[in-house]
Amino acid sequence: MGGWMVPTASLLGAGWYFAACVILGVVVGRWADAKTGLEPTFTLLGIVLGLAVAFVGGYRMLLPFLRRLGSEPPE
């Protein structure tokens, strides 16, 4: 029964991490745009940086899960 909980928790954690990175990038970009008046420069930069951090961090989070998945014998 509990064999599916660890992979599910890993995927949920990676999903939340991905969303948080992108949202934080947008929020910080919007704040910087409001301070400088350079709309939408920092918002776009925040989106790009948030996506980059999300992809790299998400990959590093899921790498042990992917290695474990690849090493298990097929059923």
Image (tube, rainbow, N blue to C red):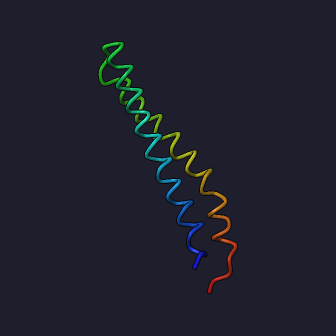
Residue found at x 64% / y 57%: 63
Q: Left of 65 or right of it: where is 31?
A: left
Residue found at x 42% / y 27%: 28
In the image, 54 versus 12, the foreground residue is 12
Give the x, y percent position of residue 8: 53, 66
Give the x, y percent position of residue 12: 49, 58
Count the labels in the image. Answer: 0
Q: Is residue 10 above or below residue 47?
A: below
Q: Outermost residue, top direction?
A: 36
- Splitting the image into 4 quarters, where does residue 10 fall? bottom right
Residue found at x 34% / y 19%: 33
Q: Left of 41 or right of it: where is 25?
A: right
Give the x, y percent position of residue 52: 50, 40
Q: Quadrant of the N terminus?
A: bottom right
Q: Left of 54 or right of it: where is 73?
A: right
Q: Is residue 15 above or below residue 48?
A: below
Q: Quadrant of the C terminus?
A: bottom right
Give the x, y percent position of residue 35: 36, 14
- Splitting the image into 4 quarters, where does residue 62 fall? bottom right
Residue found at x 65% / y 71%: 70
Q: Outermost residue, bottom direction?
A: 75
Q: Is residue 27 above or below residue 62?
A: above
